[in-house]
Image (tube, rainbow, N blue to C red):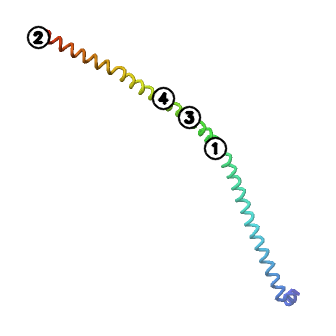
Amino acid sequence: MTAAVLAELSAADLAVVVVTGCSIVAVVALLFVLQRAVVTLRWLRDALDEVHAQALPLVDDLARSVADANDELARLDRLVGSAESISATVDATSKLAYRALSAPVIKTVAMTSGASRAARRIRKE
């Protein structure tokens, strides 16, 4: 009986059976690939969650460090400004002292020198 059924199978029926078999194999292969993609996406999501969990505290620490560095730079800028101001004041004071004291000191040295010459001449005479 089975031989009679195979004899009645036409080429179109055989093509339908072959296409159906190939379709089943293709669907199974596609399901396998899809399952692997889902596993990979879950692994990727877990890895990204871990990176996210570790990165947020680091970013917060970085923001705090940058804020602290900015505060220190502002403080340093104030210190440099104060040092420049002090330097300018000392420079102006030293110029003023030089102007105020140079003439009397020169005159005193000249008088002393002249007096010592006069004293030497008086002693020689």
Q: Which residue is mark 3?
A: 74
In the image, residue 61 above or below residue 3 = above
Are the residues at dot 2 and dot 4 in contact (C-beta closer than 8 Å)? Answer: no
Q: Amino acid at mark 3?
A: Ala
Q: Earlier in the sequence, mark 2 or mark 4?
A: 4
In this rendered view, identify the residue nearer to me: 56 or 39: 56
| Res 111 quadrant in image | top left
| Res 101 quadrant in image | top left
In this rendered view, identify the residue nearer to me: 111 or 5: 111
In the image, residue 42 above or below residue 1 = above
Q: Earlier in the sequence, mark 3 or mark 1?
A: 1
* Circle 3: element type: helix
Instruction: Using the numbered discs, state the Cα–Cα distance from disc 1 to disc 4 in whole angstroms.
Output: 39 Å
Instruction: Using the numbered discs, state the Cα–Cα distance from disc 2 to disc 3 in whole angstroms.
Output: 72 Å
Nearer the observer, disc 3 or disc 1? 3
Q: Earlier in the sequence, mark 2 or mark 1?
A: 1
Q: Which residue is mark 2?
A: 124
Q: Which residue is mark 4?
A: 85
Instruction: Using the numbered discs, state the Cα–Cα distance from disc 2 to disc 4 in whole angstroms.
Output: 57 Å
* Circle 2: element type: helix
Instruction: Using the numbered discs, state the Cα–Cα distance from disc 3 to disc 1 in whole angstroms.
Output: 22 Å
In the image, residue 43 above or below residue 3 = above
Q: Earlier in the sequence, mark 3 or mark 4?
A: 3
Task: Say the numbered circle drawn on residue 59.
Answer: 1
Q: Residue furthest right?
A: 1
* Position in image of residue 19 (x %, y %): 79, 80
Residue at screen point 84% across, 85% down: 13
Q: Amino acid at mark 1?
A: Val
